[in-house]
Amino acid sequence: MLQKLRDKTSGWIATVILGLLIIPFAFVGIEQYLGQRTDNSVARIDAPPTWWPTAPAWWPVSVFWTHEKITSDEFRSRFEQERMQRRAQQGEAFDARAFESVDNKRAILETLIDARVQQVAAQRNGLVVSDAMVQKAIMDVPGFQVDGKFDYARYKLALASLTPPQSERQFEATVRDDVQRSMLAMGVGNSNFVTTAEMDRLIRLMGERRDVSLVLLPPPAPDTAEVSAAEIQKWYDAHTAQFRAPETVEIEYVEVDASKLPPPAAADEATLRHRYEQEKARFVEAEQRLASHILVRVDEKADAAAQKAAEEKAKRLADQAKAPGADFAALARANSDDTGSQVAGGDLGWVAKGMMVAPFENALFAMKAGEISAPVKSEFGWHIIQLRDVQTGSQQTFEQVHDQLAREQAEVDRERTVSDFTSRLVDLTLKNPSSLAPAARDMNLPLQKLGPFARSNAQGIGANPAVQRVAFSEEAIQSGAISDPIEIAPGHSVLLRVTAHTAEHAQPLAQVRDQVIAAVRADRASKAARKEADALVARVNKGEALDAIAAEKQLPPPQVVPGVPRGAPVPEAAVSDAIFAVPAPAAGKLSAGHAELSNGGIALFAVSQVTPGDVATLPAEQRKMLQQQIAQVGGGDDVRALVDSLRKRVKVQVVEQNL
């Protein structure tokens, strides 16, 4: 039997059949093998070959595709950088929990995807970053500069301070990638321009003024009609977001307030004298010098002839000032270019070290009382300095600074008392982290409770941003443990524990029925008022005067406001926007419209004349600056459009579980 099977399976037909069967098994095996490999990417970007933009993504064609990944390490590094930037910008207002939200993570990931898509496009289009471009990008980083110039030592120190540290080669590779990513965007963004005709049209629109008449219609009368059950249900279903109860917490807490703790005993004389001896250098009065000067001003960038002329003038003035019987003050009033001291005869008052530029200070403190210096060069020009008097530095005695030392020591002792008290309190909470009551009892502190409260309606310490960050944090809610001390003011901190938490949730219709009814009635009243305003606008556009309508409605006569510019709150910003949204009126006609006011009323208006902005009135420099700004805005829009276009040409897959 085995021989017969061997004979039946050794022919060419059997070979073909076996080959066909192997193919699907091979693909299944490859797919399983690839699927079992560990993949730590948060996003995958696949682009078809440039020579076949519509190539299918299935194997074997997919081997010609470009495959890029954004790893979880890349994402986490960018995420932490963004966290540090926002914390620095927002300070106490930074909400760590909101930052960790899925929406925020996706937003940051989208920026990484956009950058990688641009880099792929740059590579596929043959854009290359030269070594000179990398060098310039590095040398232009402010953090690597000292006094505005690239400093190699600062550069090395900065790379060593990174987490993790990077070598120069690693950092250069990162910069090369960043530059390559931005090449397309910079090229497209910088290519935008604004034509002369576009600028003229924009200036006419921006400078446009409109003559308008206004009638203010009062808020509509309250709607008291019955609201049916069907209307209530329909409104509730369409506006569920308006009727959600916010997230709330309840907390228990204790306060450590320095002002309520027993004050420490006053320091004795020995303690103060010991402090004085340790800090004696603090109580030395600096030497001061009474000085006057004559300034011959010359720009550092002036040519050699101007520099020489200023120096010669300074020398002549110095010789005159040193002549017997010379009046330095009179010379300064007649010749000094320092407008701040000229009227006072060059008097600069008492000068201590660190108050003047280095060349001036060095010369002044090298002089003797009564001397007049030779010309001294500084960044402002040439100075002739007169030293009129010297007040030498002196050591203040213990008695002179006794009260200051006592105040400082009292502050140190107070801070130490608060620190020791807080440390003992924390030690007690660590023994029983699930309840504040034992620690509060042992430290003779009242155990206080607050809540339930939401972020938006908190009172007392609950309104403090630092307290909210802890109270609404996932850790505090899940663990129920006592927090670390939270400083809410100097010398004032709290320790809290979340005792109850309610997540944001939809409120049932029965609970918010009255709110829904009020919303339906307000909507009906608003729609009725807008319908009436639409009818009045139609009457004005047909030729009826606003005066007649105001009289009919028993309202004050229209307010006539000529030459309203764009953005003027007449009477509110929304009304101004509506005034400039209606078309310009034909000759002898009116162009009417309306806008809702913040009090619920409506402003009915009629535009009688439109005066375009005058192109000739805008100075050339302002026009050029405005043209550049508009080009930059347009360039930004072009870059966004480019990125959107590039995104459509690739396939992006986000791996949510790796975020």
Image (tube, rainbow, N blue to C red):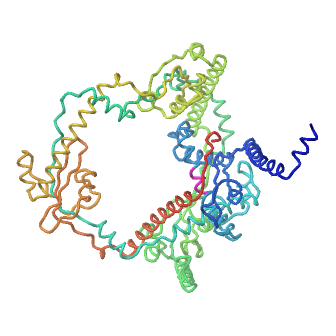
| Quadrant location of the N terminus in the rendered image | top right
For residue 138, what is the image quadrant?
A: bottom right
Is residue 603 part of the magenta span, yes or no?
no
The answer to whether residue 141 shows anywhere in this view is no
The answer to whether residue 339 shows anywhere in this view is yes
Q: Residue furthest right?
A: 3
Q: Position of residue 609 (x, y in %)?
A: 17, 65
**Residue at 68% across, 66% down:** 134
**Residue at 18% across, 45% down:** 531
**Residue at 20% across, 37% down:** 525
| Quadrant location of the C terminus in the rendered image | top right
Main secondary-structure element of the magenta-colored stretch: helix
Residue range highlighted in magenta:
110-115
Between residue 453 and residue 24, name the one nearer to us. Answer: 24
Q: Position of residue 299 (x, y in %)?
A: 53, 76
Q: Is residue 261 above or below residue 159?
A: above
Q: Position of residue 416 (x, y in %)?
A: 62, 28
Q: Is residue 405 left or right of residue 67?
A: left
Q: Position of residue 470 (x, y in %)?
A: 55, 30
For residue 476, what is the image quadrant?
A: top right
Between residue 154 and residue 20, name the one nearer to us. Answer: 20
Q: Is residue 151 above or below residue 42?
A: below
Between residue 108 and residue 138, name the one nearer to us. Answer: 108
The mark tally for this picture is: 0
Q: Is residue 213 above or below residue 94?
A: below
For residue 50, what is the image quadrant?
A: bottom right
